[in-house]
Amino acid sequence: MTERRPASDAGPHGLAFFQTIVEATPEAIIVSTPDGRITYLNPAAERLLGYASTEVAGSSITRLVPLHPDRRADPVKWLARWAAEPEPEQSRHLGFQARRKDGRELTVEVRVTRGQIGDEPRFFITFRDITQRRLDQLAAKDQSLRAARILMIAEDGIISCDAHQKIIFFNLKAEAMFGYRAEEILGRPLTELLPPDARAGHAALVDAFGKGPVASRMMSDRAEVTGLRRSGAVFPLEASITRVETGGATTYTAHVRDISLRKQAQEVLRERERRLHAVFDHAAEAIALLTVDGAVIEINASALALTDGVDAAPQGKPLWELAWRAGSDADADDRRSALRIAIEAAGRGEASSLEAHIDDRDRRHRVDIVLTPVFKSPGEVEFILVEGRRAP
C-alpha cells in the first residue's frame, strides 16, 4: 500500500503542488495508518533510512523503529498518544532509535500529527537524524560529570553561585572548611559564608566584578578575605573568583583556601624575627652578617659605634670599606687589608680571627674579631657572621 500517486493537478493548490512540496522538503516524512502501517516515505526519508518507499509500504512502523527488549517504549502507542494532542502546537519531539536498511541505528527526533487523506485517517510523522547531536550531548555530559567529580575532590574549597549570588556548587573541601554539608547550603546566599561586617558591600563588589572586563582575579587584591564557619569562627582565606557566562546566564566560582595555619606560622616567624632583632640590635658585642664576598647584610648599633658615623646605611658595602676609627691612615689601610683577608678566608669556609685597634676619645681599644662561615650545605657558605668584642 502506498500513498504515492501521479500528479494530476498542476494548480497552485492541487495534488501536484503539494506532492512537489513533500518530495522536495529536506525533512524526512513518513505517513502511516493509526495502527502503524507505513503508507509512504518521502525522498528525504528514503535517503536517510536506505529504503525505497515501495519496499516498506504496508510494513509496521516497527520495521523502521524496532522494539528493543531493554526499552519499554512502543513506537506505535507513543505516536498514537502524541498524535491525539488537541493542539498542534503541543506536538512533542520524541526520541527514538531508528534502524536503516543496512542495520545501522540512528537516534531520531520525531514529531507526529494526525490528519486525513481522503476519508482515511493518517499519521504524518516528520523526523530528523540527531545521532551526532546526541553523541555530542553525551560527550558533554560525560565531560561535565568528570569535571564535577574532579572539582568535588579538589584540594581547594570550590564554591559556585548564580547571578543572584545563591550557592549552586559546594565541594567536599568547602564542606570541611565551612562546616556545612552541600545539601544544607545549596540555594542559600553566599553571604552566609562571610562575617557579618563583610556582608554589606560584598554583593555590590561581586556585581561590579561581573560587569568588569576581567574574567578572574584574586579577591585579596582589594583587602584581606575572611570566611565564617558554621561554628561562628572567623578565619582567613586566600581566594580567587572567576566569572563564566554560558547560555546568557552568569556563574561566579570562587576557589578558596584556609590559610589559618600559614598566618599562624607567619606570625610565629615575625615574632621570632622581632626577638632576634631585639637581641641583635641591643647586643653589647659588635655583630654583622655578610654575604660570602663580604658585603654588609645586617649590622648592629654596637658595630656602627666603632665607625665615625659617615656610613649611616652601610648595607651592601664591603665591611672593610666602612669608616672604622683609626689613629692614622696607615693604621686604617692595614686594618682594611687584614679584615679583607679574614673575610675571604671565611668565604672559603675557614673560621678566622684577628685583632683590631679602635681610637675612641683619645684612647685606643683593642677589638677581638671572630669570623664564622655559615654553611647552606656542606662545602657551600651562605653567610659570614662577624663578631667583635672590646678587650678589657
Image (tube, rainbow, N blue to C red):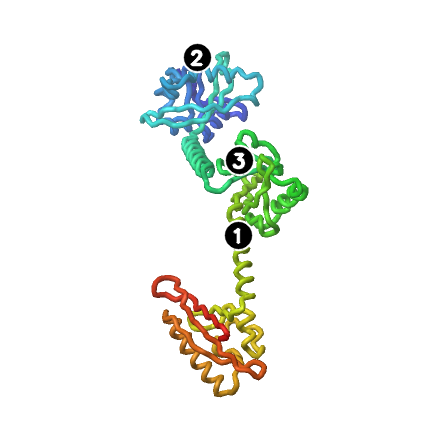
Label 3, secondary structure: give it: strand
Q: Which residue is mark 1?
A: 268
**Residue denoted by label 3:** 169
- The answer for how far apart the CA atoms under marks 3 and 2 are is 49 Å
Indicate whether 99 appears above or below 172.
above
Which residue type carries mark 1?
Val
- Tell me the CA gap for discs 1 and 2: 83 Å
Find out whether the residues at labels 1 and 2 contact each other: C-beta distance under 8 Å.
no
Residue sitting at the far front:
392
Residue nearest the viewer, comparing 41 with 210:
210
State the residue lying farthest toward the left: 102
Q: Quadrant of the N terminus?
A: top left
- Mark 1 to mark 3 CA distance (whole Å): 35 Å
Amino acid on which the number 3 mark rests in the picture = Phe
- Under circle 1, the secondary element is helix
Report if residue 332 is visible in the image.
Answer: yes
Secondary-structure class at tag 2: loop
Residue receiving disc 2: 35
Q: Earlier in the sequence, mark 1 or mark 2?
A: 2
Q: Quadrant of residue 361?
A: bottom right
Pointer 1 local density, CA inside 10 Å: few below 14, some 14–19, many at least 20? few
Seen at 62% across and 38% down, the residue is: 191
Q: Which of the two discs, 1 and 3, sits closer to the camera?
A: 1
Answer few, some or many: residues within 10 Å of disc 2's Cα (few below 14, many 20 plus, some between 14 and 19): some
- Residue at 48 percent across and 12 percent down: it is 120
Q: How would you rate the neighbour count of disc 3 (Cα within 10 Å): few for under 14, some for 14-19, many for 20 or more?
A: many
Q: Nearer the viewer, mark 1 or mark 2?
A: 1
Q: Position of residue 6 (x, y in %)?
A: 43, 22
Q: Which mark is residue 73?
A: none
Q: Position of residue 217 (x, y in %)?
A: 55, 49
Left or right: residue 116 versus residue 196 is left
